[in-house]
Amino acid sequence: MCQKEYSVVADVSREQVWKAWSDVSNWNKWDHDIEWSILEGEFENGGVVTLKPRNSGVVRSVIEDCKPLTSFTNATKIKLCGITLATLRFSHFLENHKAAIKITNTIEVTGPCAWIFWFLIGKNIANGFPESLASFVAYAKKS
């Protein structure tokens, strides 16, 4: 398993953060590595996010463990001939931090080929967390 986490403390409300997180079709306004994204179903467990990263193919991710105003996780399985080679799991958490909110993003890559996909995909996503979270906070404050 390969994993990396990044947090930021921001003067933004849980409601503003949740509104921005659950507005999947506008993720590209704060995550500049996404060309477009859509939500099939509701922003809840089992909802499916389909997105197009820049310089990559279309990706489908399933929402897991969704706790409104607190956290959600979305997971993408990378398969070959029906066999899961790796799962990329993105977790997003909110915690109270004094008079502000601590926002944490985590990427975890598991599976028999986790280390390969960490170096091909996961590491670059994790390295972009500081920029994407800063952009996310600015976007959420406008929500």
Image (cartoon, helix red, strand yellow):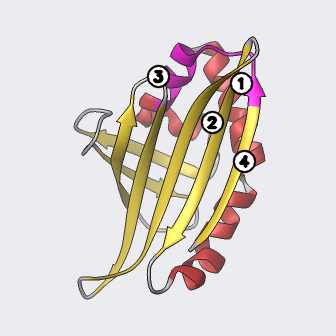
Q: Which residue is mark 1?
A: 138
Answer with mark 4 or mark 2, whichever residue precedes in sequence. 4
**Residue 87 vs residue 42: left or right?**
right
**Closer mark to the observer between disc 4 and disc 2:** 4
Residue drawn at the location 39% of the way across and 31% of the way down: 67
Q: Percent x, y for residue 82?
A: 23, 83
**Residue 35 vs residue 84: left or right?**
right
Q: Secondary structure at mark 4?
A: strand
Q: Which residue is mark 2?
A: 30
Distance of mark 1 from mark 3, alpha carbons? 18 Å
Distance of mark 1 from mark 4, alpha carbons? 17 Å
Answer with mark 2 or mark 1, whichever residue precedes in sequence. 2
> Are there few (<14), some (14-19), or many (20+) residues within 10 Å of tag 2?
some
135 or 28: nearer the viewer: 135
Answer with mark 3 or mark 4, whichever residue precedes in sequence. 4
Q: Percent x, y for residue 130?
A: 77, 46
**Residue 45 vs residue 12: left or right?**
left
Distance of mark 3 from mark 2, alpha carbons? 19 Å
Q: Secondary structure at mark 2?
A: loop
Judge whether 11 appears above or below 123 on screen.
above
Circle 4: residue type: Tyr
Q: Which residue is mark 4?
A: 6
The quadrant the C terminus occupies is top right
* Mark 1 touches mark 4? (CB < 8 Å): no
